[in-house]
Image (cartoon, rainbow, N blue to C red):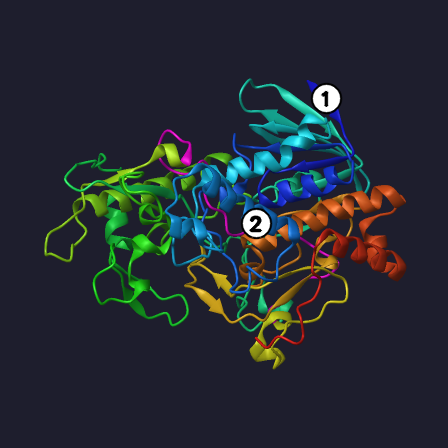
Amino acid sequence: MRGRRCEVMVVGGGLGGCAAALAAAEAGRRVVLTEETDWIGGQVTSQGVSALDEHRWIEFFGATASYQKFREEIRSCYREHYPLTPHARAERFLNPGGGYVSRLCHEPRVALAVLESLLAPHRAAGRVEVLLRTRPTGADVAGDRVRCVRLADLDDGGEWLIEAPMVLDATELGDLLPLTGTEYVSGAEGRDETGEPHAAAKANPDNVQSFTACFALDYCPGESHVIDEPRGYVAFRDAQISWCHTHPITLQKVTRTLFHLPNSPWGTSLWLYRRILDRARFADGAFPSDLSLINWPQNDYWDGNIIDQPEAEAARHVDAAKRLSLSLLYWLQTEAPREDGGAGYPGLRLRPDVMGSRDGLAKMPYIRESRRIRAVFTVLEQHLSPEIRKDQYAEPFPDSVGLGLYRIDLHPSSGGDNYIDLACAPFRIPLGALIPVRMENLIPANKNIGTTHVTNGAYRLHPVEWNIGEAAGALAVFCLERACSPRKVREDKALLDLFQRLLERRGVPLSWPEAVPV
């Protein structure tokens, strides 16, 4: 068994984990960051969602300075290394993919390169050690404190034992929570517990948002890149795959096309939806085709939950999600009705190189919902809903550690629910949602904070996950420096004020500007 001692252990190398590791390392602390795949970055890299889900003011306000640096470094990478057209190079807010879902659509590998570059000086100085291809398997817990975490090395079958006084769970599914005995909830809470208007009538731990096996395509007209028919194709096609899908807000059926048609609204083209490389923004001939990220309603997988399931059952659902995605591709290549009356686009080509995988799918499923800690404070729909609050802003939590804004966006779930897509006011991230009801040195740093099934729909997006991770990393250091617990920071007004001033100096905004009408 290989061992390590550090001051801050971050288990999970997604956006939250990277932000947490950076915050702790910038304060001079020794950090071990672990990651199950061979790519750090989580939803923006190994899960393939590199069209960032953000709010409309993201270029100017509503995210941390370090997240904005991450975004600008992505743009700098394209400006420095790609043959942009003069017009694209001059764009203040360059969007390399031009996808209409986001102001910054790009390739997963570019985000990976940026995250690696941000961590590089800390790794060189020995402040950060990154253990890739490691998965947590157990923990040693004494009372209300985690002493160490065991991890399996997925390459050589060995085992790691990491000891640290502060432990951050930045995994995609909240994997440390059951391993450490931390109280948590998963799936849907009941309305009798939360009072939320859109909560389920009764609690159902198996009712979890759908996940997606994302992939990337380019298009080579005149060529054939048709894949073999996936197992279960006909059943997937008949159940879920067509140009029609449910509008998430109105719940009415809407019809899309693959490519943009003349005189059609921009938003009818699924190709443009999450396009991550727009060849028109680059020199003629630099790229033979656009690249488009396929993360559509047609390949959301809701036929099963992978949280707290036997390993074989979870693997069965992940395999089915992959076959659903490949079935969507096969349908697009062979049967999809074309605007010219024909069927199929055989020139659509799966791009394994874009996802860094052999099968062409993202290394990991895109996870929308995790286990969530039982927190000293839980964010409810009533705190976020402008209809309930009759206010343009969400509840002004006095223990704010950051900001976010996104609709309360729940995709169809494994419990049979359709979309729940609700208006959401600009909100704060309360420190209380990062503090477990009992554990003293474990801090959530991803989608596993004290939200509900409903409010997780607004707190699960890229900039909010980053902010949560950054706040968690900064909190761990703050507690080490003062020999106190996260709980004490929230309960002691003087400590809370000090911590919030530290966050502000880091460039973490804690409140929305009241002068700006939403």
- Say if residue 472 shows up in the picture: yes
Amino acid beneath label 2: Ser
State the residue position of label 2. Answer: 370
Which sits in the foreground, 374 or 37? Answer: 37
The residue drawn where x is 62% and y is 37% is: 118
Q: What stretch is highlighted in magenta?
A: 355-381
Quarter of the image where one finds residue 162: top right
Vertically, is 362 above or below 429? Answer: above
Vertically, is 6 above or below 198? Answer: above
Classify the position of the N terminus by image quarter. top right
State the residue position of label 1. Answer: 3
State which tag comes first along the sequence, 2 or 1.
Answer: 1
Is residue 15 part of the magenta span, yes or no?
no
Classify the position of the C terminus by image quarter. bottom right
Vertically, is 86 above or below 511? Answer: above
- Say if residue 310 shows up in the picture: no
| Residue 161 horizontal/vertical position (percent) | 70, 25
| Residue 313 horizontal/vertical position (percent) | 45, 39
Q: Is residue 384 left or right of residue 366?
A: right
In terms of secondary structure, where does tag 2 sit?
loop
Quarter of the image where one finds residue 121: top right
